[in-house]
Amino acid sequence: MEGVIRKIGREELEILFQMASSLSSTLELSKILNIIMESAKTLLKAEASSLLLLDETTNELYFASATGDVSERLKNLTVPLDKGIAGACVRTGKVKVVQDTLSDKEFYPQIDKQTGFATKSIIAAPLNISGKVIGVIEVLNKKKGVAWTEGDKELLIIIGLQAGQVIKNAQMHRRVQEHKNLLRDEIDSRYKIISASAEFKAVLELAKKVAPSTASVLLLGENGTGKELIARYVHRLSNRKEGPFIALNCAAIPVTLLESELFGHEKGAFTDATSLRKGFFELANKGTILLDEIGDLPPETQSKLLRVLQEREFERLGGTKTIKVDVRVIAATNQELDEKIKQKLFREDLYYRLDVFPIRIPPLRERKDDIPLLAQHFLSIYAKEFNKAVHKIDEQAMKELLGYAWPGNVRELQNIIERAVVLTNSDQLDQKSLILPSGAVTEKQTFDQGLKEAVTEFKMAYITEVIARCGGNQRKASELLKIQPSYLSRLLHQPEEESTN
C-alpha cells in the first residue's frame, strides 16, 4: 500500500486527505457514503459514481448512494447478484475494469434503460468489511473519453479500503444508537406514568413547569409514592434529556463509602482504592442526578454537596484537582427535613438550596382513582413476564384493592399484583389470588361482629393508618402511638393474640 501511495500525485493525495478528514467528522452513514462517492468521482475524473450494498435476504444489490443527474432515480432500483459488472465484482471479490460496456457480456443494461443514463465504461471495486464482501463501489464514464488507468484502479482500491472501515464504524454506531433507543424505550415503559386522579395530575403540572429550568427540585412524599418516577419525568422534559439520569439512594450506601460514590476517588485515596474512580456526579455531567433519601445524608457529606450546588465543583476523595460539572440535582425524601434541621441533623443552608422547587407527591390512599389503572398496568406487565393469560381483575378483588389503606403505596400495589399473577391459574385475578398483608385494613365497616372483634379491627385499622401517615416508618409511628417499637411489631405480627390480652 505504501508503494501505491508513493505513486499518487499531489492533487490526488490532497483529495484523499480531504476525504479522510471529512469521514472522521461524522458517523452518519448517509453522509459517509456521499463523501466517499463524491471523492471517488473527483479522484478518477469521472461523470458519476455509485455504491451498492448487498441485501443477503434477496440476493440483490441496492443503490445505497450515487452521484450524478440520475442519482434520485437509482434509489429504488436493484441489481441481481448474478447480473452485471457490480454482481461479478461482489461474487469474485476482485476489481473489474471495463473500458467499453457495449462489448462486455457482463454489462447489465437494465439500469440505464430505467434511468436514461448512458454507461460507457466502468471501474468497480469490492467493498470489504472484516474479510467479507458486502458491496461494490462503481465509477462510471472517464471524462474526455479516455481509458481507465492502472492508477485509477489503485486509487479505487484505496478508497474501497477506507470506505469499508468507516462504513463498519458507522454501522456499529447506528446499532449502538438503535440499542440505546430500545433501552430508553424499555426504561420509559417501565417508568410510564399511569394516572387519572386530579391530585397526581397537579403533581405532573408542577413537574412540567420546572423541567425546562435549571432549578433544584425537592420531591416530598412517603416511600413508594413514585418520587423516582417524577424525577425521571422532569429529566425527560428538560433540555438534559439526552444526558445521563443517575439515581442514588443515600440511605442504601454505607456512610464510609458514600462520599467516594458521590464524588469519586483517586488511586491510593484509601486502602482499597487501587485505581481512579469517577463518582456519580462526574458520571451525571450534562444530565440529572436524583439523590433519594436525602435526609439520611451524613453531615460531613452535606457540606460537600452544598459546594457542588453553589459552585458546581468538587475534588475527588484523596485528590487536589478541582472537577467542574454541570448537573441538575433532584433530591427526594420521606422525612420532615425542617425537624431534622431543628435537631441539627441537616444543614439549613443545604435545605434552602434543595428546596428551590418543592413538589409533594400524595400517597396512594389519597388518589384512589389511580388504583384501578395502576393495578391493570401491573397486571399487563406481569402477565406478559410470567406468560399468563390473565387479563382482568374481578369486581370483588378490585373492591378490596380500593378499600385497603396502602401504607406501602404504589410499590406495595405492584408487589401484590405481581404475587397475585404468580398465584392465579385463571384468566382473572380474584380475592383468593389477591393476598393482602396480615391485618390489612379496608374502609368497609360492618356491624355484625362482637365488641372484642370490632375493637381489634379498629385498633389494627388505626395502627395501619398511623404507620401509613409516617411513610411506613414504624419507629416514628410507635412514638405517635405512645407505645414501644417492639410492642408495635408484636401487634402487627400477632394481632389476634394481642387482642385477647
Image (cartoon, rainbow, N blue to C red):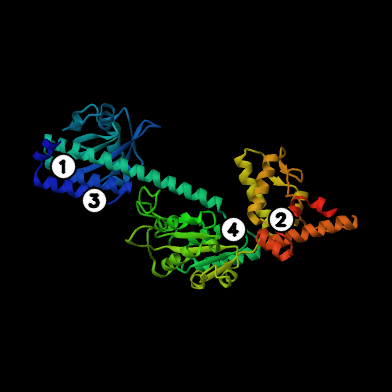
Front residue of 44/245: it is: 245
Between label 3 and label 1, give the one nearer the viewer: 3
Dot 4 falls on a residue whose secondary structure is loop
Q: Give the residue type that dot 3 points to.
A: Ser
Which numbered disc covers residue 243? none
In the rendered structure, are the residues bearing label 3 and label 1 in contact, judged by CB atoms less than 8 Å apart? no
Q: Which of marks 3 and 1 is nearer the N terminus?
A: 3
Residue 162 drawn at (x, y percent) = 23, 41
Residues under labels 1 and 2: Cα distance?
Answer: 87 Å
Quarter of the image where the N terminus is located? top left
In this rendering, position of residue 288 left or right of residue 489: left
Give the x, y percent position of residue 87. 29, 30
| Three-letter code, disc 2 | Ser
Residue 322, image x, y percentages? 33, 63
Decide which of tag 4 and tag 2 comes sooner along the chain. Answer: 4
Compute the Cα span from label 3 to label 1.
18 Å
Rendered image: mark on residue 226: 4
Image-based side of 24 in relation to 221, left or right: left
Between 291 and 357, the residue placed more toward the observer is 291
In screen coordinates, is 434 left or right of 228?
Answer: right
Residue placed under numbered mark 2 in the picture:
486
